[in-house]
Amino acid sequence: MLRSLDSGVSGLQAQQTMLDVVGNNIANVNTTGFKASSVEFEDTLSQMLQPAGAPQANQGGTSPAQVGLGVRVAATATDFTEGAAQTTGVGTNLMINGNGFFVVNNGGQTQYTRSGDFTTDGNGNLVTPSGAIVQGWPAVNGVVAATGPVSNVQLNPGTMSPARATANAVMTGNLSNDAAVGATAESQVSVYDATGAQRILTMSFTRTATGWNVQGSDSAGASASGALTFTNGAITSGQTLTVGGVTVNMAQLSGFAGSGSIAFASQDGSAAGTLQSFTLDNDGTIEGSFSNGQKQAMGRIALASFTNPDGLEKAGDSNFVATPNSGLAQVGVAGSGTLGTLTSGQLEGSNVDLSREFTNLIVAQRAFQASARVITTSDDVLQELISLKTQ
């Protein structure tokens, strides 16, 4: 049997693999987060016709004479170059800017993906189109501890922001220095207890010969009083007053001549609230906005990196699984170390270059035709040998 037949067959098989890979790349030109592959070839073991000879005193050395036995596929390499950004405006669509992979739980198996086309399911889990659950760290009382094992990321619409008791309130404004003795000023604000129950806190000011007296009271019956003095318009005593557990800071009040007007600038309590919307920060933190006006972290999405991403194995659904050659996943927060940052409302497109793929398609086609021609030529040679016998 002619060696060229085996070489031709191996060429057909190798180029067929290249056609398969190129065809798959072209088919996934619009697949979110898809990473194109390329084929790497190597020659097979060559047959030794004559070994190398060492140089002698009166004889030069000779080089080995070998005949190759064809080609084989050495590897299919994955190109992890970042794809182009595609703006969607959907809050749950995420794109990794830089290195890293999303961590997902697919039927109990940990997998990794660059596709951030996420939605929420009936349980509020953040999931991929195939139902794999995105992994991260949950928040406890608005604080995320991005350490330890990851778990399911949830965006449950029924999430509540707990009530927060009012501990501090701040007043601003001017108490007129030239107001008549006995003149009054008043301001009210809603404050809350630990259960979220609302009550009205009232601060009443009365002009005296030396400054202003203040009387604080709330609708629950608590009260307190004090006196304020000013020097050149700046408050010098009576900056705070505690009424029913709420410390009212009056250090920003002034006592200049002219018109007077006072008001509460802020208070730090709130009633309980339900989740209205959420946003995602560049580090993967999910910040919820609640009906009580509060904002707090609900969790943080985890990213993973690998020593050798080329060692990852494609598992379908645009997901990868770790292998012994990829190394262990290094899970961390977006933007830390070598991990990229996250952008909400965008998706990473496929990194398939159509112009390059069509060129590879032509190259593979011509190589396939050439290998087929080697086989037909070898067949013609064999036919000539058979003809010699029959003549």
Image: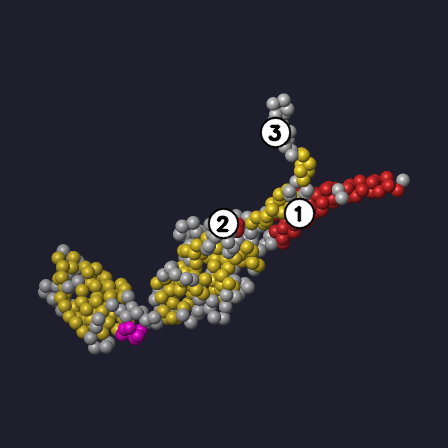
Residue 194 is inside the magenta segment: yes
Position in image of residue 225 (x %, y %):
15, 70
Task: Kindly identify which residue carries mark 1.
Answer: 14
**Residue in the foreground of this view, choosing between 31 and 71:** 71
Residue at 66% across, 47% down: 14
Place residue 178 in its image quadrant.
bottom left
Q: Can the viewer see residue 231?
A: yes
The residue carrying pointer 2 sits among few (fewer than 14), some (14 to 19) or many (20 or more) residues within 10 Å by Cα, namely some
Three-letter amino acid code of the residue under disc 2? Asn
Farthest-out residue, bottom: 221
Up-down relation of residue 337 to residue 270 (above or below): above
Q: Which residue is mark 2?
A: 308
Predominant secondary structure, magenta span:
loop
Left or right side of 33 for 261:
left
Start and end of the magenta stretch? Answer: 193-199
Answer with mark 1 or mark 2, whichever residue precedes in sequence.
Answer: 1
Dot placed on the residue nearer the N-terminal end, 1 or 3: 1
Which quadrant does the N terminus fall into? top right
Residue at x-position 23% and y-position 63%: 171
Identify the disc placed on residue 54: 3
Question: Which percent across, then down, holds residue 51?
Answer: 65, 34
Q: Quadrant of residue 46?
A: top right
Tell me the colour scheme of the image.
secondary structure
Determine the secondary structure under disc 3.
loop
Amino acid type, label 1 = Ala
Q: Earlier in the sequence, mark 2 or mark 3?
A: 3
Q: Write the residue at 47% across / 70% down.
A: 123
